[in-house]
Amino acid sequence: MRPEPTLIASDRVIPNAATSAMDGQIKVDRFKAVWVIGHGLAGLVGVMFFAQWDAALMFLLLCAVTICAGHSVGMHRLLIHRSFDTPRMVEYLLVWLGTLVGMAGPLGMIRAHDMRDWHQRQANCPPHPSHAAGFWRDAWWQMCCVFDLRSPPTNRD
């Protein structure tokens, strides 16, 4: 028995008559900002007071595992795009590793990805989802802000 086809982003984001990709504003998400800045500062303090080569190597190894295997392969290629099949336990492990990156859980990542793709397919795409504001502003927006649409489309999970 074949599994049901997975919905693609254009099928999961459903705009209404009042939805406009440009009618919204970028707002600081206080929780995200405190989370990201707090972890960044804690990391800097840790490096300044407890710098060790083995800790630096462990940092690089864990970044490779969580970002590459977890976020890129598990969350993005496997969960969002369904680019390949794998046993269920491997899927769970890869997605769990992806959640350790701290961006969102599985449903949050799917929604964020689908909204970004929806924005980028519109005739006019605002600078937040198009990453068109320069490195530092884009980094701030992506890590500490949300793009709040006045009349957002609905998401079908």
Image (tube, helix red, strand yellow):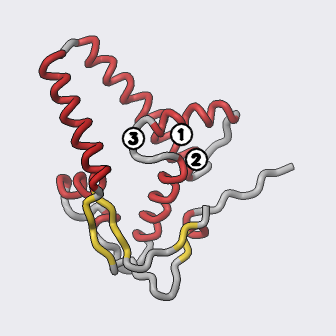
Vertical position of residue 95 compared to residue 59: above or below:
below
User: What residue is pinned by disc 1?
Assistant: 74
Q: Quadrant of residue 35?
A: top left
- Helix or strand or loop: what does disc 2 sit on? helix
User: What residue is pinned by disc 2?
Assistant: 79
Q: Quadrant of residue 125?
A: bottom left
Q: Is residue 117 left or right of residue 37?
A: right
Q: Considering only order in the chain, which callout, 1 or 2, is on the residue closer to the N terminus?
A: 1
Mark pair 2, 3: CA separation: 16 Å
> Which label belongs to residue 46?
none
**Residue at x 49% of width, y 33% of height:** 97
Q: Residues within 10 Å of mark 1 (few under 14, many from 20)?
A: many
Amino acid type shown at disc 3: Gly
Please say whether residue 143 is visible from this viewpoint: no
User: What residue is pinned by disc 3?
Assistant: 102
Q: Residue 100, how many percent across, how many down?
A: 43, 35
Q: Residues within 10 Å of mark 3 (few under 14, many from 20)?
A: few
Amino acid type shown at disc 1: Gly
Amino acid type shown at disc 2: Leu
Q: Is residue 54 left or right of residue 114?
A: left
Q: Residue 25, how many percent across, how many down?
A: 28, 73
Vertical position of residue 68 compared to residue 56: above or below:
below
- Helix or strand or loop: what does disc 3 sit on? loop
Q: Quadrant of residue 22?
A: bottom left
**Residue at x 26% of width, y 50% of height:** 33
Q: Considering only order in the chain, which callout, 3 or 2, is on the residue closer to the N terminus?
A: 2
Answer yes or no: do the residues labelled 2 and 3 have beta carbons within 8 Å?
Answer: no
Q: Considering only order in the chain, which callout, 1 or 3, is on the residue closer to the N terminus?
A: 1
